[in-house]
Amino acid sequence: MMTQRLPETQKIIDYLSRVPYGETASFRDIASACEVDLSVKRHLIDSSIKTLATEGVYFKSVRGTGYRRLHPDQGVDTVRKWHNGQQHRSTHKMSKQLNGANPSHLSPSGRKSLESGLNEVWFRKQVESKLLREEARKAQRNKADEAQKELQERLNLQHQKFLEGLENQQGS
């Protein structure tokens, strides 16, 4: 099911999707693109950036300036940080609710279902967090492997040039 977007939000999404990687979209440029006072309606930017993140387009806030577009591989770290924050907030909220609850008023089956539900939520969050960490590690390993291969190719090329220079010196 697709949700309806405000026309201003769609204008911001269109503008931000055209920003090149590494460039920063200033608040002034975004405001002129959607023709709205964003100091009053800041939520339009937030919802636009969240929508773009679901499509694999990531932005990072630049304090006092605007939003910088990240490369897709940088977005993994951003999503992981966001997810960890969400996990922390939901766990904190759950513990606050439990601290205010009086489980002695619940029946034994009610207490058991409450505990099993909380354990299931906790376990699911742990698994999601572990999967995100593994995905980030794989991305870092792939970067390191590519860099190692590139370095090895450069060394082989330099070694080959060195051997050719020796052959030329011995031939003369």
Image: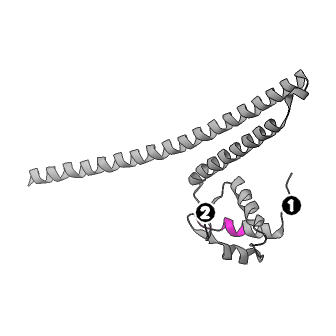
**Residue found at x 66% / y 54%:** 56
Q: Position of residue 61 (x, y in %)?
A: 63, 63
Residue in front for this viewpoint, 144 or 92: 92
**Residue found at x 48% / y 47%:** 143
**Three-letter amino acid code at the position of disc 1:** Gln
**Residue found at x 58% / y 49%:** 77
Q: Mark 2 or mark 1: which comes first in sequence?
A: 1
Could you tell me how far apart the alpha carbons at marks 2 and 1 are, in whole angstroms?
25 Å
Q: Which residue is mark 2?
A: 69
| Residue 137 marker | none
Q: Is residue 36 above or below residue 144?
A: below
Q: Is residue 111 left or right of residue 155?
A: right
Q: Is residue 34 left or right of residue 16?
A: right
Q: Which residue is mark 1?
A: 4
Q: Secondary structure at mark 1?
A: loop
At label 2, counting other C-alpha atoms closer than 10 Å, the crowd grade (few under 14, some 14-19, many 20 or more) is: many
Q: Which residues are magenta?
A: 14-20
User: In the figure, residue 102 lies in which quadrant?
Assistant: top right
Q: Is residue 53 left or right of residue 3?
A: left
Q: Is residue 83 above or below residue 102?
A: below
**Three-letter amino acid code at the position of disc 2:** Arg
